[in-house]
Every structure is written in structure tokens, then in C-alpha cells.
Image (spheres, rainbow, N blue to C red):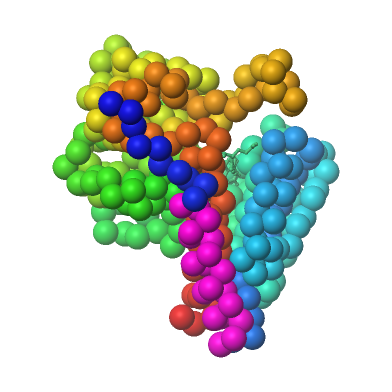
Amino acid sequence: MTAEIIDGKAIAATIREEIRQEVAAMQAAHGRVPGLATVLVGARKDSETYVRMKKKACAEVGIASFGHELPADISQDELLAVVEGLNADPAVHGILVQLPLPDHIDDEAVLAAISLEKDVDGFHPLNIGRLSMKRRDPLFVPCTPKGCIELLDRSGIEISGRNAVVLGRSNIVGLPVAMLLLHRNATLTVCHSRTADLPAMVRQADILIAAVGRAEMVKGDWIKPGAAVIDVGVNAIDDANDPRGYRLVGDVAFDEAREVAGAITPVPGGVGPMTIAMLLRNTTDAAVRAFGG
Ligand SMILES: Nc1nc2c(c(=O)[nH]1)N[C@@H](CN(C=O)c1ccc(C(=O)N[C@@H](CCC(=O)O)C(=O)O)cc1)CN2
């Protein structure tokens, strides 16, 4: 079997066009557009790239973006003051604090300071708490997990009643995506570094979400024939043939897995573009609420 490739780039482009039209309609109806504040602390190259991609995506759909580039040695109080200022700014409907933050900053305190109505990353403890409960919808769902579910839905992959295995238990991806799958009536297994016989567990998966951050860890013979494989990993590995000196690979050994799976996301071009599309979705939803529907 050769798997169907789930083209995250194309699906994200469709979603972005849907949002562009909504934003144009908002502009016509209210004379206002959604606004996203991005907060970048320090000069990590990957974070700079992601924030730049987010601002560009905002511009393409008509969302206003307000960039705050702050020094790596900013104090926690100073950063909290920036967040408070954005909470009070009526032009800002969503606040994105790019992670990870420098070690001297307590990221939980910063995420908890974001107004619930502007928490477009969905990382506020109350939003996460609501995500973990039945029938208590959070105001926002974290972007990468939401993007994984959207990829399954838009590819016509049934979730209810299927065995879903989540590899990884991070706050950003593993735990929230596990909750979303459970809410959609999947039978859920969460695997991690202490799981015994990982290949055997993964082989149970009708739907596999790989989010461990280890390059090509999941081998082809770990995959159940016909499974849907959503690869969240974005890992740089050395490649002398690439002009950048590296290339990006996922957590799944793609060439092996595509011979066994029914459907699979590539890296790059799978989940990554969906993360940004879902941020635009959440920001637009925040503005709709702020404008009164
Ligand atoms: N506040 C947040 N911080 C972080 C999040 C997040 O959702 N909110 N997620 C990640 C990084 N991330 C967004 O911030 C992100 C990662 C990857 C991509 C993406 O489109 N990747 C491309 C490849 C890009 C490249 O060539 O370098 C792909 O997979 O096709 C977008 C966003 C951590 N921090």
C-alpha cells in the first residue's frame, strides 16, 4: 500500500482563504479587522522564523499584527507589564507569546496573565482545564492540536470508535491533542518515554499522532497497515546536499511509513502550516466575540 499524502500546506491555504473572506466581510460590516499581538523574547532563530511566518500569514488574510520584540534579559515583571498592556488594548484581539521563553521566566505565570478572551494560543490554565473536562468547551483550543484534528476531518478520516495513539505528552501538543481525540470518541492511548514495548503500542493505532521531537523515531514496521499518521515533529538533521546544511524531518520515518499507512502527513508541509492557519482561525474567532458576533 502507498499512503495518501495529507497535504497540510494545501489544506491550510484553503482555510486561510476562508479566513481572508471572513475578515473582508468584518471590515465591510464593522470597519474593523482582527488584531494579533506577537510577543517574542530573545533572539532564538527558530522562534524568530515562526513569528515572522505568523505576521506574514496575518498580512495575507487582512489581520493586523502588532510585533513586540523584547530583549532576552527582560525581567518577568516587565514582560507581565507588556501582557497587561496588550490585555487592555482594544485593537488587540489575540495575544501570542512565542515559546519557549528564556529560562529565568516562569512561562506558566506569563500564559496565565493573558486575558482569557485573547488567549488565541489556548495555553491559559483555564482554557487547558476546560479542554480536560467533558462538556466545558474552552474559549480557544491550542493551534497545533486543533490543526491535527482539522487535518483528519478535512481528509475524511473517521475518529469516533477508532484506536488513537498519541506519542508524546507535552503541554503544547501531546496532552491537548489526546483530550481532543477523547472528546471525539476515539479510544485513546498516550505513549511516552517510559512506555514498555513502544512499537507494539503504536501498532495498535488506527490514528497515530507522533509528537515526541525525535527525528524519524517511528519506523515503518511500527505502523498498522492502513493507519492515518499525523506527524507533528519538525526536526533538523544534517544534510550536506541541502544548501542550508540541514533538512527537516518528522518523528516518523516517512519513506518507510508511507508504504504501510493509509494516509500520512509529510514534514515539512503537514502539521506546521496548520498551526499557523489555526492561529488565524482563533484570532478571527476572538475578534468575532469582541465585535459581538
Ligand atoms: N506560542 C507558541 N509557541 C510555539 C508553538 C505554538 O503553537 N505557540 N508551536 C511551536 C512552533 N510553531 C509555532 O509557533 C510552528 C512550528 C512549525 C511551523 C511550520 O510551519 N513548519 C514548517 C517548516 C518551517 C521551516 O521550514 O522552518 C512545516 O512543518 O512545514 C509553524 C509554526 C513552538 N512554539
262 with respect to 255 (left or right): left
Q: Position of residue 134 (x, y in %)?
A: 26, 53
Q: Report the label total.
A: 0
Q: Which residues are magenta?
A: 11-29
Residue 145 appears in the rendering: no
Q: Position of residue 106 (x, y in %)?
A: 64, 40
Q: Position of residue 140 (x, y in %)?
A: 46, 58
> Can residue 21 be found in the magenta stretch?
yes
Residue drawn at x 54%, y 61% is 16
Residue drawn at x 26%, y 59% is 135
Q: Extreme top residue here?
A: 197
> Can residue 22 be found in the magenta stretch?
yes
205 with respect to 98 (left or right): left
In the rendered image, the vertical position of residue 174 relative to residue 53, given as above or below: above
76 or 210, which is in the foreground?
Answer: 210
110 or 161, which is in the foreground?
Answer: 161
Res 24 → quadrant = bottom right
56 with respect to 131 (left or right): right
In the rendered image, the vertical position of residue 169 relative to residue 81, given as above or below: above
Residue 160 appears in the rendering: yes
